[in-house]
Image (tube, rainbow, N blue to C red):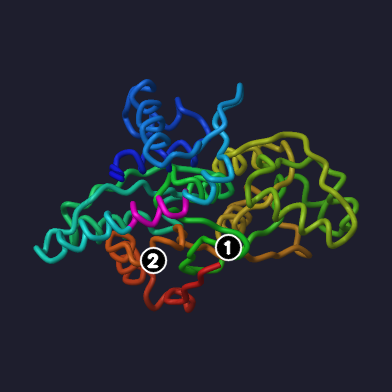
Amino acid sequence: MTLELYQLRSFAAVADTGHLTRAAERLHLSQPALSAHIRALEDELGVRLFERTASGMTLTRAGQELLQHARGIISAAEQMRRAALAMRGALSGHLRIGSVIDPEFIRLGDFLGRAVERYPQLELELHHEMSGAALEAVRDGTLDASFYFGATPERGIAALALSEVVYRVAGPAAWRPRIEHADWGTIAALPWILTPSTSTHNRLVHALFGEHGVEPSKLVEADNETVISNLIESGVGLSLLREDLALAKEAAGEVCVWQPARLSTTLWFIYRAERQGDPLIAALREMLEQTWHGVAPAAAAERTA
């Protein structure tokens, strides 16, 4: 039996995306070439790996079992290649990194500056995502790693804790008389600016009000922190803002902060647990720990869910 590494990469990409077209785009292949890789691998193994449906590609039971073996082989081959490069003092490769919140808050410039200086042959491709989408992209392999904020990531995801993120309820400055002494029900009934349901920000809002048996009244949906801040300042509605932003804008007379609510979550750096031994991921962890050292008490705390 002869298994080709490129066939296994194609197998994993189709399994991750559930679609030939998206997998072909990720691998920079034509769809016919990718289909040929899958057929050849199925012929070599003597089993069917996917069910072809109108909506995409679904793993068969055999495909589900063999996928883990394929990932192990791909990971081992990549680690061997990178270990050889590291022996020559030339750690190199290409990583897709997700960013969330604003670059200054996650110290993106400092982190990238250190990485480029220490590993000049390391190529980093940045993608700004909402936190929930970033987690999904790391899970399915679209991103190699990402910043993320929210609850402890799920099983199979390794997470390096970087800092606490605190949120406050902020409203238009002119609304201060309306909200200063308002109860939870009154605050929930006012117009709210919410992020999409897949985002951590959205889950934080609903968890906050769920504890008090009420639900916020959504008026507008926005997926960008700067946009949300501008909408609050413009008098559109209430939303969660990071405490550092909320207090600075309140001091400038641009928003008002509802005092009873203060909630915190964690800023993480996440990647798939199976890549714990990957030299490129280890290099990123090293740069992050240097960037956050002495600032975030949890900076060296790593968790594998």
Image disc number at residue 288 = none
Helix, strand or loop status at disc 2: loop
Q: Residue at x 44, y 39 (%)?
A: 46
Q: Amino acid at mark 2?
A: Gln
| Residue 105 forms part of the magenta stretch | no
Q: In the rendering, at what x and y percent does residue 148 appear?
A: 52, 56
Instruction: Kindly identify which residue carries mark 2.
Output: 276
Helix, strand or loop status at disc 1: loop
Instruction: Kindly identify which residue carries mark 1.
Output: 155
Q: Residue at x 49, y 41 (%)?
A: 16
Above-or-below relation of 245 to 46 = below
**The magenta stretch spans which residues?**
67-75
Q: Residue at x 23, y 60 (%)?
A: 80
Front in this rendered view, residue 100 or 23 = 23
Judge the density around disc 1: few (<14), some (14-19), many (≥20) Cα neighbours within 10 Å: few
Magenta part, dominant SS: helix
Q: In the rendering, at what x and y percent does residue 236 appear?
A: 72, 36
Front in this rendered view, residue 155 or 149 = 155
Judge the density around disc 2: few (<14), some (14-19), many (≥20) Cα neighbours within 10 Å: some
Is 80 displayed left or right of 144 in the figure?
left
Q: Amino acid at mark 1?
A: Arg
* Residue 207 seen in the current view: yes
